[in-house]
Image (spheres, grey):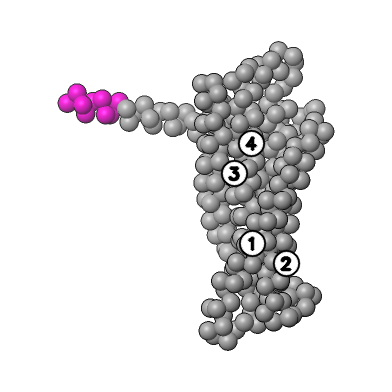
Amino acid sequence: MAFRTKKQYILSKGLDEYFKGVHSAWKFTGLFFKEVFKRPFHLREVINQSFEIGLKSLPLISLTGFIVGIVFTKQSRPSLEDFGATSWLPSLIGIAIVKALGPLVTALICAGKVGSGIGAELGSMKVTEQIDAMEVSAINPYKYLVVTRVLATTITIPVLALYCSFVALYGSYLNVHAEETSSMIAFYQSAFKTISFLDIFTSVTKSIVFGFTIGIVGTYKGFNATQGTRGVGRAANQAVVLAMFLIFIEEVLIVQVANWFRFF
C-alpha cells in the first residue's frame, strides 16, 4: 500500500512538472509575439544572428543537399526502369525535394547545429548570471536575446531550404546527365513541370514554421537552464531533441492541411 502511494505520488509530481513546463513554454512563446512589435527592434543583432545562422550553415547545407539529390536519384532510377518510366525521373525528384526533402533536411540540420548552439549560448549566459546583469543594466534580455534569434531563424531557414532544394536538384541533374546526357534546362523544366504554386507556398510555409520552432525551442531551453555547466549541456541536448520532434509533428500537420486545400 505504501509502495502504491509512493508510486502515485511520483506520477502526480511528474504530471505537475509536465503541465508546468507546457504552461511555461506557452507563456514564453506568447511573450515573443508581444515583444516583437515593440521598440527597440535591434535590427543589427538580427542581421548578425542571420549571418551566424545562414552563412556559416551553407557548407553543411550544400554538402547534404548535394548528396541527397544524388543518392535519391540513384535509388529511384531502378524502380522507374522496371516500368520503363525513367523519363519521369526529373519530375519525381522535383516533387520529392521541393515539397518534402528540401525543407525537412534543412530544418533537421539546423535543429542540430543552430538549435544546440542557441541553447548552449543562452544557457551559459543564464548560469553565469549574464542575463541578470543585462536586466540590471536596463536592457530587456528577452527582447535582445530571444526575439532577435527567433526572427533570425524564422527568416534564414526558408532561404536555406530553397538553397538546399536547388543544390539537391543540381546533384540529381549531374547523376541524370551522367546516365542520359540531358541538358540542364530540360531537366529543370521537367522537374518543375508538375510543381504547383501551392507546393511552393507549402514548402516555404513549412520552412518558416520550422525556423520559428528551432529558434523558440533553442532560446526557451537556454533561457531556462539551471544547475550550472551541467545544465548548459542538458539545455543544448533538449533543444535539439524537442525541436526535431516538433518539426516532424508540424510536417505531418502542414502536409495534411495542404492536402485539404487541393480539394477546393
Secondary structure under tag 3 reads helix
The boundaries of the magenta stretch are: 1-9
In the figure, is residue 261 to the left or right of 162?
A: left
Which of the marked residues, 2 or 4, is nearer the chain's N terminus? 4
Q: Disc 2 versus disc 4: distance between alpha carbons?
A: 30 Å
Question: Badge 1, how many Cα within 10 Å: few under 14, some, many 20+?
Answer: some
Taking depth in this image into account, of 216 and 231 the one nearest to the observer is 231
Q: Amino acid at mark 4?
A: Gly
- At x 60% / y 44%, what residue is drawn? 111
Residue type at numbered disc 2: Tyr
Taking the spot 59% from the left edge, 68% from the top edge, the residue there is 72
Asked whether the residues under the numbered discs 4 and 1 touch, taking CB atoms below 8 Å apart as contact, a structural biologist would say no
Residue 3 counted in the magenta span: yes
- Circle nearer the viewer, 4 or 1: 1
**Which quarter of the rendered picture does the N terminus lie within?**
top left
Mark drawn on residue 260: none
**Residue at the spot of label 2:** 170
Question: Which residue is tagged 1?
Answer: 67
Tag 4 and tag 3, C-beta contact below 8 Å: no
Residue designated by label 4: 117
Residue drawn at (54%, 85%) of the image: 83
Please, what is the three-letter code of the amino acid marked with disc 1?
Ile
